[in-house]
Each structure stands twice: as C-alpha cells, then as structure tokens.
Image (cartoon, rainbow, N blue to C red):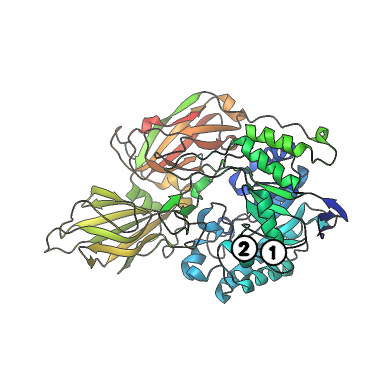
Amino acid sequence: MADFTVGDEDFLLDGRPVRLLSGALHYFRVHEAQWGHRLAMLRAMGLNCVETYVPWNLHEPFLGRYHDVAALGRFLDAAREAGLWAIVRPGPYICAEWENGGLPHWLTGRLGRRARTDDPEYLVHVNRWFRALLPQVAERQIDRGGPVLMVQVENEYGSYGTDRGYLRHLADLLHDCGITVPLFTSDGPEDHMLTGGSLPGVLATANFGGRAREGFEVLRRHQPSGPLMCMEFWCGWFDHWGAEHVVRDAADAAETLREILACGASVNIYMAHGGTNFAGWSGANRAGDLHVGALEPTATSYDYDAPVDEAGRPTEKFWLFREALAAHQDNGADSLPRLPPEPALLTGSFGATWEGWTSLSDVVDVLGGEESESPVPPTFEELDVDRGLVRYRLDVPGGRQPYPLGVLGLRDVATVYVDGVRAGVLDSEDATLADPVPGGAEVEMWVESLGRVNYGPRGGESKGITGGVLHERQYLHGVRARGLRLDALSVPGAVAKLPLGEVPPTSSGTTGLYRGRLDLPASASDADFAWLRLPGWGRGFVWVNGFCVGRYWGVGPQRGLYVPGAVLGAGGNEVWVLELDEAHDPAGLTLGT
C-alpha cells in the first residue's frame, strides 16, 4: 500500500515527487485476450501509468440490467500485473468518440437536456450506477494495494455546461462510494472551459494537442499551485466515415511531448493505443464550430494514428515517443523494458462460402422487438433501440394525386420503399424523395442510426424519425414500427432461428443477412489478428463466430475491419454480414492479410 497525494508543485508518492507518464488505453476497445500485450507495449514505450474511461451504456444497456461491470476490475488488475499505475475516468459522460458519449439511450431519451445537470431524476440514475460500478475502483486504489492513483469528476464539463452543483454532487458521490485517492477535472485550456468545468479543492488538468506552454499558462491563471498535467495530449485524431484519413506527423507530435515534459508536467497520451469500435459503438460529431451542423459519424477503427497501432504494433511515433520518455525514467533509459513479441497476422487470403441469405424483413420480424402502432413515428429511444435500425410502415391515403413525400427530423439515414420497390435513400434531417408518391401506396422506411453524438450541445439527441412523414405538406398518421437492436444478433442461437434462402446473385444490390463460412488453416489458431475486407459491399455490420467486429461502409476511409485472433479458429468459422445498403458483390469478402 502507498499514499498518493497532490502537492503544491508535484504529485507525491509516499511524500516523494513523482511524474505521471500515462497513456490512454480503453479496455472496451481491445479484446480482453489482448489486454496484457497492449499494456506491455505502453510500459515498453516508457509509460508508468494507464488511463481508461468507463462507458455506462456498455455496462447498463437496459435500465437496471448490468453487463460485465467487473470488466473494469479485471483490466485494472491486468494493469497492476503489467507494472502500471492507473487513472480512471468513470464519467458518467465520457465523450471518447463513443456512442452517446457513454450515456445510455434510455436515459437521454427520457431526460434530454436534463442529463449532465443537477436534475433529481438524472442523479437518481447516476447514484445507482456509481454505487454499482465504483466498488471495482475503490478496492483497487493505491492506498489499498492496487494501481489506481486518481479518479476524474465528470469529463470536459467546461465544454458543455456550468452546473457547479452537479459537479459538486459527483465529487461527493465519489467520496461516498469509497474513493479516497485524489479527484481531478480535465478541460481545454480556455477561460470559459476551466471556469465551467473545475471545482474548488479539486485538481484541474488541461487537454490539448500542441502549444503546451501556452496551455499551462492558462491553467496556471485558474490554478496557481498544484502539479501541472496534460490529461489528454492529442497525439493523433480519429476518422469520420466519408472523410480523409487523419494523420499527425510523428516528429511534430514527439516535439510537443518533449515540450510538455520540459514544462515539468505530467502527461497522459491520448491515445497511446486506440483499438477498435466493435459492435457499432462508434459515436458521431456535428460539424461546425458550434457542433450543431451535419452529422459526422465516426469510423469503426479507433487507430487514432496512435504510437501503438490498431493491431498492437509499434509505429514511428512509438519509437520517437520512447526516445522522448527515456530521459524521464526513474532508473534511466536502460531500465526501459523490451517490447513484447509483435502480433502475428493471419497470412493468406480466405474467401467466404455463402450458405444462405435472409431478408431484412425476416431479420426484424424474428429478432426485433414487438411492432408498435401509433399516430406518429416513435423514436429509437421509445422502441428501446440503442444501436441498430427501425422499420417504419405507413399507408398513403387513396383518392389523391402523386405528391412529394418527405421526412422531418430524420436521424440518420432512411432507405425508402414504395409498394415494395426501392424509391431512394434519404440522408439529411429534412429530406424529400426525388419522385412523387401516389395515393394508396404503401411506404416502408428503414432507418439506421449512424451513431449518437458524443460531444457538444446536441449530445443525447434522439434517433429515428423525430419529426414526421409528410405527403405534400400534410403529416401522414398511423405508423407501424418495429426496431432491431444490433445486440440481438449476438445472442447465442439467435441467427439460427432465421429462415435461410438462396443467396441473391452478384450485382443484385440486395439487402439482408448473408450467412457464410470461412475455412481457415491450422495457423489461424496462432494468429493474433486478421483483416476482413468487403470490396463491393455497401454499408452494414459483420460478425465472426458471433463476435461483432463492427460497421463497414464503402465510402471509406476505412477499407478493412480488424478481427482479433481470439475470435478465430482453425477450420470452419461462421461469418454473418448484415447489409443495409446495396451489396453489389458478396463474393468480395476476404479474411487474412
């Protein structure tokens, strides 16, 4: 056991100054079988600490039903075994380019803008969640022999609001739940952010990607004493679907790291290893300086151009960072550990043998929720759908001429069928089909969420058709809706319930669930990872042996999905592809190099 405190100028461990050299690694973005390797990579880079967020919505997907909360504890145990301290950022909001910023859909769907405030109903849920989660942290604090040094209060709250009572409630709640190590806040080094997001008596830290001295000068104006720390040194960035791949020059990033260290500050490299947004957990941003513009969905890969890449391999940035950190080791550069073995890629290229296909309608009817009927379209939240899609069906009254048919408040993309024929795709909040729709037609709208906003004033917004469907300027009422949660396909035995038909011919552009088999050699059992590529497919999700490796989308920039070796095996491997747009060439799927 040890005593970790915040001094007037330094962090103190048993009274001795210590500098935190930390790196972000999110346990929920890395397959558990690979935690040990990734943590060893951080240690080999010269870090002495690991930082992680905790996504509430992953661990409480349904109100009152928890899922593997103990994963956080297992990760902290793995960090300790790897010789690393730990910083925990439990939220309840985390941003992290994660779906809804980590807040559950059932919470924000009900509370809207009351979330992240001192609202009594919101705090009831936060109190309950923290009391379920925080024993994983409390029993692993450094003063109890564990690795946890510090715990964060909320996350970048100064970028969002000014409810000081809410922050104070969270700080008191953390203490009530047994957190005895120092608390901290983190915000951008701007006056409005630091005044809105900090608390008296709680260490404030700053987040930035460059101009370290200027950032710390702003922080010092608001906090004259205490150790300096950059809690998020953005050494890279994340990708949006349909945009260019983001890369930061390695030498430029290393120079900023040296500047931070030259200021005598501690640092948390964000990200040290990014990992992957498995199972459709990617968030989204809104464009523009005020983050209220067009939706920008985040890609499945969270490689982040980090020093340890998505597959766990060192990059040029890794070696430059290791060099910068070497001079700050307690026992000198020679004390840096060797790198663990580099992850082995499955060599060769293996195509799928397709065994059957099922229409989207069959998937929703068998695995979706109950169909509801209401005057207006229900949102995803009202149908209890977090990640997935909703089928809306409605009838246009007869006895009228063709009129434009449009949607108000669409989030995010709708494939529209009129009398069973594909009529177009709508992908903006207020959109209209190109061709008018006659009276007496039956309309189906398949609406997909591309990820809930994780940052800015539009966080927590609902998904689905949030306004209504218009024929000319008249609302169409009487809507039948059925939702499909993405996690319904991961329930053991669920896909086996689906009726299998003949696989549609190549270039048919057919949506639906494709079920196939990947035959792999004996060497697959020794592979640490493989790339799954889907040229010729449109947009959808892939499962390998029941594990959802994430969303694919032909718009790029991502061209391959990362598959952890732990989900592969020699011989037959089952693959499911849920195509939601147009699959022009199902034969194009390959796994391997």
Image x and y of residue 259, in percent: 70, 44
Could you tell whether 94 is left or right of 201 in the image? left
The structure residue drawn at horizontal position 49% and vertical position 28%, both measured from the top left corner, is 519
Quote the CA–CA distance across marks 2 and 1: 8 Å
Q: How crowded is mark 2: few (under 14 residues within 10 Å), some or many (20 or more)?
A: some
What label sits on residue 191 in the rendered view? 2
Give amino acid for label 1: His
Dot 2 and dot 1 residues touching (CB under 8 Å): yes
Residue 315 is at least partly visible in this image: no
Image x and y of residue 324, in percent: 73, 37
Image x and y of residue 567, in percent: 56, 37
Could you tell whether 73 is left or right of 65 in the image? right
Q: Is 385 or 537 nearer to us in this picture?
A: 537
Could you tell whether 50 is left or right of 282 in the image? right
Vertical comparison of 20 with 373: above or below? above
Q: How crowded is mark 1: few (under 14 residues within 10 Å), some or many (20 or more)?
A: some
Secondary structure under tag 2 reads helix
Q: Is 373 or 13 nearer to us in this picture?
A: 13
Q: Name the residue under label 1.
A: 222
Q: In which quarter of the image is the N terminus?
A: bottom right
State the image quarter where residue 222 is shown: bottom right
Secondary structure under tag 1 reads helix
Vertical comparison of 233 with 166: above or below? above
Mark closest to the chain's N terminus, 2 or 1: 2
Give amino acid for label 2: Asp
The structure residue drawn at horizontal position 24% and vertical position 65%, both measured from the top left corner, is 476
State the image quarter where residue 373 is shown: bottom left
Q: Is 387 or 471 nearer to us in this picture?
A: 471
Image x and y of residue 510, in percent: 31, 40
The structure residue drawn at horizontal position 66% and vertical position 38%, both measured from the top left corner, is 254
What label sits on residue 73 in the rendered view? none
